[in-house]
Amino acid sequence: MRRADRLFQIVLLLDRGRAVTARELAEALQVSERTVYRDIADLSRSGVPISGEAGVGYLMRAGYRLPPLMFDAAELAALALGSRMVRSWADPELGRAAERALLRIEAVLPKKLRDDPARDALLVPGFHVPDAMRAPMAKLREAIATQRKVRIAYTRADGADSERLIQPLGLVFWGETWTLGAWCELRGEFRSFRLDRIRGVVALDSRFDGDGMLARYLLSVQQESAKPSADCPGGGPQGLPDMPESRLTKA
């Protein structure tokens, strides 16, 4: 990594709202802690407002803004690929937002970076994700963001209809299936609900405290995937959770 790129990465890592130690910076940048100390000193001398000290951690003081960004070809390819994934696999509102974001980035790029045939060859088909899978996403995203409880009409794996009061925590894409990770107040535990089985979504006025709950949900997915099953004694195939189907039969 060029030194200029390394200094820029340090600024990005320090602008996350928490103190970052020299060891963490060194591991992220794959350099020595001595190099980090020298880079921090150089950034401070150049006017970058960094607070902190060796052995404690560093933090960017509020109000500092980075200069306009420039991306290399690989970074642009990653952004384009991510944008196409969102447009093909997520709800229309989020897809349009991803497209607008990419257009803004491309508008300030040199022509040689805007026109890259290799980037155009990264394709993300979306025909395998049915509309029913994406339909409830916008309402669920808003409920997750505002930590509002949601009442859903749901069709279980056995075909029976049910109604659930849940605390929505996150949306997970498994390659072909979107699921909603949530705390189910009926079952009193974490559950995953397939989006194409959700027949209706009503966001309620009552809120919940979701602090740390998403991490606990993900831990429950990991623990479930490690359990032996009749089809796969070692857990989920190739280390992937088999929770979306096995747990949803009980949802």
Image (cartoon, rainbow, N blue to C red):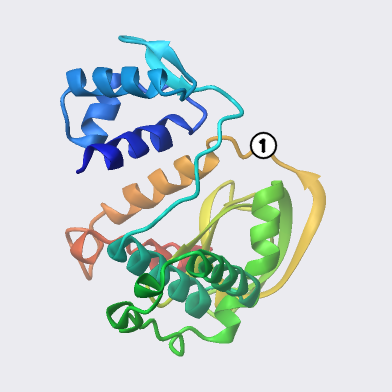
Q: Is residue 75 left or right of residue 203?
A: left
Question: Residue at image x 40%, y 78%?
Answer: 176
Is 153 drawn above or below residue 219 in the view shown? below
* Secondary structure category for the residue under label 1: loop
- Residue 34 location (% of width, % of height): 18, 18
> Which residue in the structure is indicated by mark 1?
209
- Residue 152 location (% of width, % of height): 70, 66
Is 204 drawn above or below residue 26 in the view shown? below
- The residue nearer to you, when weighing 6 against 249, is 6
| Local crowd size for mark 1, using a 10 Å CA cut-off: few (<14), some (14–19), many (≥20) | few
Quick check: can you spot residue 174? no
Q: Is residue 14 left or right of residue 159?
A: left
Quick check: can you spot residue 23? yes
Question: Residue at image x 50%, y 66%?
Answer: 179
Q: What quarter of the picture does the N terminus occupy? A: top left
Question: Residue at image x 43%, y 62%?
Answer: 247
- The residue nearer to you, when weighing 25 against 40, is 40
Question: Residue at image x 59%, y 83%?
Answer: 132
Toward which corner of the image does residue 26 lie, by quadrant? top left
Q: Is residue 159 left or right of residue 173?
A: right
Residue type beneath disc 1? Asp
Is 10 drawn above or below residue 171 in the view shown? above
Toward which corner of the image does residue 151 lie, by quadrant? bottom right
- Residue 136 location (% of width, % of height): 65, 72
- Residue 249 location (% of width, % of height): 46, 69
Residue positioned most to the right = 205
How many numbered callouts?
1
Toward which corner of the image does residue 65 lie, by quadrant? top right
